[in-house]
Amino acid sequence: MDRASFEVLEGEFVAIVGPSGCGKSTILNMIGGLVTSSAGAVLVDGAPVTGAAPRHVGYVFQKDTVFPWRTVARNVALGLEYRGVAGPERARRVREAVALAGLAGFEEAFPATLSGGMRQRVALMRTLVVDPEILLMDEPFGALDTHTKLVLHAELLALWEARRQTVVFVTHDLSEAITLADRIVVMTRRPGRVKMVHEVKLTRPRDVIALRESDEYAREYGRLWHVLGEEFAYPQGGHPQGGPGK
């Protein structure tokens, strides 16, 4: 990356898109305190991130990262256990989270018996159950089929509408970014710079199925693809950059 700079407002859903290797995931890791910036600064609530992630920041990774030896309920409870939440309160919050994720009846199931989409819901609720004010998401639905992805888009939007966390969402899928985000940060190819910050002019709440059939969605996609597609063209004297990716 090179002089990449943007801001995310409280309660805003911001997606980051760009070519493979442009630094999207690195930005997320710096916000989360997993990577130290070599120059400049990353500020969360006005304070620099210098080590571990602030307590009010949650992270959902691309892989579901659930523990295979823990049941659904015990996976969801993990963060609450680390924070010392008492047993009855922990059980109540886990029960509510499992129900919100549509996983009621699977509390005692182990990850090996679940579909990929169900495991990703477990990972998402494990993060959300501790009520983070800021949610970092690194291509959490990238490995899922289209139908499952759309279902999870709808569920994520419903949860976000209810809780209004600040979300920074990395994706290689432009359709996903348009469906979910208030604003989209478009990165250039390496060295990654911020090429454009685009405000998505689609009303909320959003129906993830009907949305894609609308003229408004088509206009948003066309406008963004024109800008992003320039980054996948042949560099002068070079080779194709390939499609969108991390």
Image: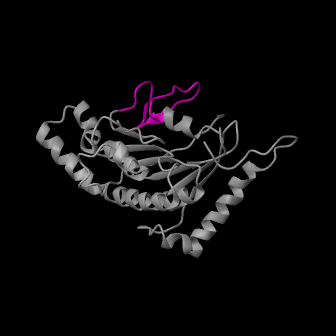
Q: Is residue 184 above or below residue 91?
A: below
Residue under the point 40% across and 59% down: 157
Q: Could you tell me which residue is drawn at 53 percent across and 55 percent down?
A: 183
**x 52%, y 60%: residue:** 146
Q: Quadrant of the C terminus?
A: top right
What is the chief secondary structure element of the magenta stretch? loop
Give the camera-side residue of 154 and 28.
154
> In the rendered structure, which segment of residues is drawn in magenta?
31-54
Please name the residue shown 19% across and 31% down the image.
84
**Residue reaching furthest to the right:** 237
- In the displayed structure, 36 sits above or below 20; it is above
Structure colour scheme: one colour
Looking at the picture, tell me which residue is in the foreground, 120 or 169. Answer: 120
| Image: 67 above or below 211 | above
100, 135: nearer the viewer: 100
Percent position of residue 238, x then y: 84, 40
- Quadrant for residue 126, please give it: top left
Relative horizontal placement of residue 50, taking residue 235 as reference (left or right): left
Is 215 on the left or on the right of 120, as rendered?
right
Residue 133 is at least partly visible in this image: no
Magenta residue check for 220: no
Asked if 202 appears above or below 126 in the picture, the reply is below
Residue 4 placed where, x, y %?
Answer: 61, 38
Q: Assign the N terminus to one quadrant of the image.
A: top right
